[in-house]
Amino acid sequence: MLVRSGLLFTTLIFFAACNSQIKDTNGNVAAVDSARLIDADNEPGNWMSHGRTYSEQRFSPLQQIDENNVKNLGLAWYFDLQTQRGIEATSIVVDGVMYVTSAWSIVHALDAQSGAPLWSFDPEVAKSKAEHACCDVVNRGVAVWQGKVFLGALDGRLIALDAKTGSVNWSVATLDPTLPYTITGAPRVVKDKVLIGNGGAEYGVRGYISAYNVTDGSLAWRFYTVPGNPAQGFENAAMAMAAQTWNGRWWELGGGGGTVWDSMAYDPALDLLYFGVGNGTPWNQELRSPGGGDNLFLSSIVAVKPDTGEYVWHYQTTPGETWDYTATQHMILADMKIEGELRQVLMQAPKNGFFYVLDRTNGELLSAQPFIDLNWATHVDMTTGRPVEVAAARYLEAPYVVFPSYLGGHNWQPMSFNPETGLVYIPVLDFPANYGQPEAFRYVPGSANTGTDGIVGSLPDNQAERDAMRALMQGRLLAWDPVAQQEAWRVEQRGPWNGGTLTTAGNLVFQGAAHGQFVAFSADSGKDLWHFPTQTGVVAAPITYEINGQQYVSVNVGWGGAFALVFGEFVQSESLPNVSRVLTFKLGADATLPPVNWQRRVHFNPPPLTADKNILHKGYAAYQDRCMGCHGLNAVSGLLVPDLRGSSYLWDEREWDRVVMQGSLSERGMPAMGAYIDSDESEAIRAYVTQQAHRGATLATQHSK
Ligand code: CA
């Protein structure tokens, strides 16, 4: 649906008339092409693609704002994104126009100088699609190309919009809508083809990346990341090779996983497209591929030819992955001297906790060192290029507490590389998860199928034990020297799940933090130079651009994503509301944000607890499998979705059934769970949540005394 009131239309005309930079000299809007993208360093005033350049360094040559004057940075304008779900988008800025996405795949075009809205586009994704979005209904941004804006919608549509008006030019389904795929990642455009992957490996899908022709949306090629059923033949030689590394009947358990849900990079000189591949379905390799095997191309970086999708090379970070250790994390291309020789490298800090430097011409491993204290492997063997695992970490015989957790040592939050300091700035997560074999495993189509037990066990009842667990939840900004493979400096933060990073030629690193601050650090030393209270947690990465000689720094704020959904107790103790906005700064500005009156405390009013121990255990188990991913550990919500402990439906068996089993609130994003659980389980979940509500009520009373 095109949202454009008469008022907004007037605004569009006005700004188009008075700001010549909204169009280029020929009157074109979003006139990005290969030549401009390849030479992006020659026009640092624009931020024309997801990582600014094809190398995805997220380094800006702009230096009007620098370490000396950044203290004078102030708010120039803000724009409300009109949602209370997570904001993960990197904005694009071309010729004076900003293109930003909100939750539910909504696109806004804004005047980048003033924040005035030009147009909005809502693809009207069915709210029930939230059931397939493991990690919030987020979107990480658009791509622009020759007058079009490309959007990957949560429900799998790839939509080309007219950059001037926001009207639909073409729209294609990139996936089978009956399967639990989603799109949250940003498309990229290489040589008249728009590239898009998908997510869903927690549920049971077969991952792939597709290339569509920019003019009409016709499919140019598709590369699957894992083999299908061998009896049906293979799409290409790469799939035949990959099938040699699998055992069992993985295609019957959802399709193997391996989704390409975020990172890509492109080298125009080598003409190679790189993309990162996700985890397996189920996570537990013993169920997915009994007896082992590397399970290509899970957790791999793959290089293909962008014209055809033909396989060129791969490097697998976690052979036979069994911990949700994706290699979908942001990749950076750079040329750097290693042991006296100039190398063309690709860098990645995937979930598994090692920082990798590869030769991007052929995939050769140049170095790998841990960037956190991990305990699933001792090191990467430079002869074989493979991690040397700690055997018990595979949790085959007994559960194992693994560092890092399934959310990784680094997740999707983009890192950045500053060629002047030679450092990579990584938003690091540092906490463990407990993995174990399940008592029983039943593949449930369309639902979460991790095949692990105790993966995110409930929080202990004892508050001191809970506090000890909280102390393990760490996060930091880490400046990493990729040549020496060692830490340069670090800034410890109040917890994990902070924002992506931007670095500039002004010797600066910008990052938003979970605790509601947008901060500028000196790039060489990590000194805290400036911060601005954002009123909300920040997970997206900032950008910078220049219009009429004025440099701007812009960041999309609004707490959300996987961690925010699951770790509700952390969210509630830190009082982190979601206030979704674009915040844009320049030197000397002094705009202010309206005060936030955040009063979303849970009002406990649970019915009496009558269920016995067996029912409570059944409710706990079903809750963990089917509810916890959105409603939070121990039913403590991250407040992006309702906190069930305060729900009046706990009192009413029939209403609870209508909501949970029949989907009476599906229009608001609560899917019908009747396909996945039976009525007894639904009732047991009601009992378990009631139990947790009593616990919350007791604690609240103690705190108020
Ligand atoms: Ca995953």
Image: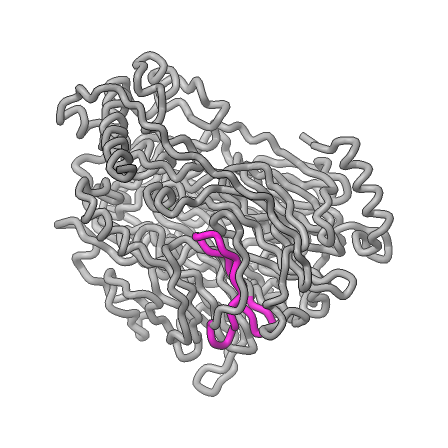
Task: Name the residue rendered at 23%, 42% in the picture.
Answer: 459
Q: Could you tell me how many numbered marks the image carries?
A: 0
Can you tell which quarter of the image residue 93 is in?
A: bottom right
Can you tell which quarter of the image residue 594 is in?
A: top right
| Left or right: 632 in relation to 199 | left
Q: Say whether residue 134 is visible.
A: yes
Q: Between residues 318 and 557, which one lies in front from this camera angle?
A: 557
| Left or right: 177 in relation to 215 | left
Point out the stretch of residues depicted in magenta: 503-526
Horizontal and vertical percent position of residue 229: 37, 40
Screen quadrant of the C terminus: top left
| Left or right: 542 in relation to 490 | right
Horizontal and vertical percent position of residue 573: 35, 45
Q: Is residue 193 above or below residue 548?
A: above
Q: Say whether residue 217 is visible.
A: no
> Magenta stretch: residue 523 in it?
yes
Q: Between residues 361 and 535, which one lies in front from this camera angle?
A: 535
